[in-house]
Image: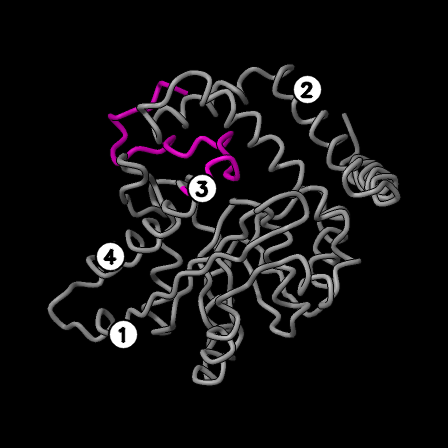
């Protein structure tokens, strides 16, 4: 039998040690090293590559084999860059953002914050591009955000990881039992980021079109939108070239839907979820190598008698 506390401490110590070593490396060398490690992992664990290939063929059915292989390789590079960016989060400054991140929506965002003073904005996002850096940018620019995450089982590691995320005022909301906190934060005027691009349990899902196939998608985003009648932004951070990024944002104004008395709550949940999903799908289509294709996105089906055995 193993002592969970000891395992927790060992994991925490190991990760801290690795992050410390990586932080001393130049950015490009750190990225190349992480890319090599991830590429090697996909070779050693064939299921990673197999799931990625299945998902890519479902999403882009008319491509040739060389295109699929290229996207898998580039997706590993994108994940390596996201981890590399997490390593350097404490060094990110406003001046760095000005010279490295294209953010055409920022002026509009500041206008929205002035008009939405009494409640926060919901940011629908996911695992596209450098997602850890994406959340960090808002806080460095003076607009901290609260966001929902799945906690690590190792408590000491989880606390340290989240401390880095929260350096400039961001707040981490644990995924378990998050809904009440989401509503509270929005009503207090804080923006809340909700990751909605991964598979969820059937009881927590609304099934919407995702690359032409029904996918179990979290209800929490649409429920929060309806319960607060907030503005919704769909956002991702696209990599333009090494160390250059562009913040992609689509504004969704669901005011007329909120006020529509001819629609049921269930219909509104579906419509909101489908709309944000379509916008995010468009972002992935524009930057396919940036998404986390290793995830079993279509694992949960609408009914129990429709098992997805292709994974």
Q: CA distance from mark 2 to mark 1?
A: 48 Å
Q: Which residue is mark 4?
A: 271
In the image, residue 219 sits, relative to residue 33, either above or below, namely below
Would you say the residues marked 1 and 4 are in contact, meaning their CB atoms lie under 8 Å apart?
no
Q: Residues within 10 Å of mark 2 (few under 14, many from 20)?
A: few
State whether residue 46 is above or below residue 104: above
Give the labeled residue for mark 1: 255
Quadrant position of residue 65: top left
Q: Which residue is nearer to you in this view: 211 or 273?
A: 211
Q: Is residue 257 left or right of residue 277?
A: left
Spot occupied by residue 141 in the image (x, y as percentages of width and height): 65, 71
| First along the sequence among labels 1 and 4 | 1
306 is within the stretch colored magenta? yes
Up the image or down, 214 lies above or below 70; here it is below
Residue found farthest to the left: 262
Q: Main secondary structure of the magenta part?
A: loop
**Label 4 to label 2, Cα distance in Å?**
41 Å
Residue 9 in the image: state x and y as whole percent: 83, 41
Residue under the image location 74 percent in, 57 percent down:
164
Q: Which residue is mark 2?
A: 40
- Tag shown at residue 198: 3
Q: Is residue 256 left or right of residue 148?
A: left
Circles 4 and 2: CB atoms closer than 8 Å: no
Q: Which residue does the image show at 36% across and 67% down from the upper left? A: 225
- Distance CA(mark 1)–CA(mark 3): 26 Å
* Highlighted magenta segment, given as a residue range: 286-311
């Amino acid at each position: 039998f193993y002592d969970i506390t000891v395992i927790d401490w060992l994991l925490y110590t190991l990760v801290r040690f690795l992050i410390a070593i990586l932080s001393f490396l130049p950015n490009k060398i750190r990225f190349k090293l992480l890319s090599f490690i991830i590429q090697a992992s996909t070779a050693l664990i064939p299921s990673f590559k197999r799931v990625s290939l299945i998902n890519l063929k479902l999403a882009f059915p008319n491509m040739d084999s060389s295109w699929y292989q290229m996207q898998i390789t580039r997706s590993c590079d994108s994940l390596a860059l996201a981890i590399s960016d997490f390593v350097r989060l404490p060094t990110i400054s406003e001046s760095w953002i000005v010279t490295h991140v294209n953010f055409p929506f920022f002026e509009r965002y500041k206008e929205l914050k002035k008009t939405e003073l009494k409640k926060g904005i919901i940011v629908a996002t996911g695992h596209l591009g450098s997602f850890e850096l994406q959340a960090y940018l808002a806080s460095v620019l003076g607009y901290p955000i609260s966001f929902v995450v799945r906690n690590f089982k190792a408590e000491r590691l989880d606390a340290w990881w989240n401390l880095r995320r929260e350096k400039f005022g961001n707040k981490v909301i644990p995924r378990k039992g998050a809904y009440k906190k989401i509503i509270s934060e929005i009503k207090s005027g804080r923006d809340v980021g909700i990751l909605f691009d991964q598979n969820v349990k059937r009881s927590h899902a609304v099934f919407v079109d995702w690359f032409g196939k029904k996918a179990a998608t979290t209800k929490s985003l649409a429920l929060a939108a309806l319960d607060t009648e907030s503005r919704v932004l769909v956002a991702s951070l696209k990599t333009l070239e090494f160390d250059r990024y562009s913040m992609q944002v689509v504004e969704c104004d669901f005011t007329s839907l909120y006020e529509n008395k001819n629609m049921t709550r269930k219909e509104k949940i579906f419509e909101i979820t489908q709309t944000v999903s379509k916008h995010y799908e468009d972002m992935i289509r524009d930057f396919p190598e940036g998404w986390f294709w290793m995830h079993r996105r279509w694992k949960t089906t609408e009914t129990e008698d429709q098992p997805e055995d292709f994974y």
